[in-house]
Image (tube, rainbow, N blue to C red):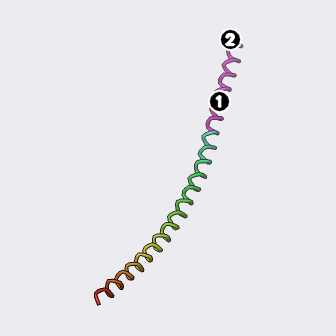
Amino acid sequence: MSKSLSVSHLFATLAIAVGFFTYVAGIEQETVVNKMEIKSISGRIDRTNVRHSEQFSEIKSMLSSISDRLTELADRRRN
């Protein structure tokens, strides 16, 4: 009985060890995938910020032009 208990204990320990290493490997794989996703999202955010900055500059330019035109119209009405 002692020998069979030792063998079953050895198999159980081996199964636990394999399960542990499989679990750790899964976590490492998920970490790599998450890092790649974060890098991708970060790149998209950077591109979006650049695009928004360009659009904001265009809007500011348009508003300045509209303001100048309104000033000209107001000056004409006064004269």
Depth order, front residue of 74/34 = 74
- Residue that appears at 31% across and 86% down: 77
Q: Residues within 10 Å of mark 1 (few under 14, many from 20)?
A: few
Disc sitting over residue 39 in the figure: none
Which residue appears farthest toward the left when viewing the image? Answer: 78
Disc sitting over residue 17 in the figure: 1
Q: Position of residue 54 (x, y in %)?
A: 50, 71
Q: Is residue 18 above or below residue 36?
A: above
Q: Amino acid at mark 1?
A: Ala
Depth order, front residue of 77/32 = 77
Which segment did they paint magenta? 1-25
Q: Position of residue 47 (x, y in %)?
A: 55, 64
Tell me the mark number nearer the camera, choosing from 1 and 2: 1
- Residue that appears at 49% across and 70% down: 55
Disc 1 from disc 2: Cα separation: 22 Å
Quadrant of the rendered image containing residue 64: bottom left
Residue 55 as seen in the image, left or right of residue 79: right
- Residue that appears at 40% across and 78% down: 66
Quadrant of the rendered image containing residue 19: top right
Which residue appears farthest toward the top when viewing the image? Answer: 1
Q: Amino acid at mark 2?
A: Ser
The earlier-in-sequence mark between 1 and 2 is: 2
Report the residue marked by disc 2.
Answer: 2
Q: Residues within 10 Å of mark 2 (few under 14, many from 20)?
A: few
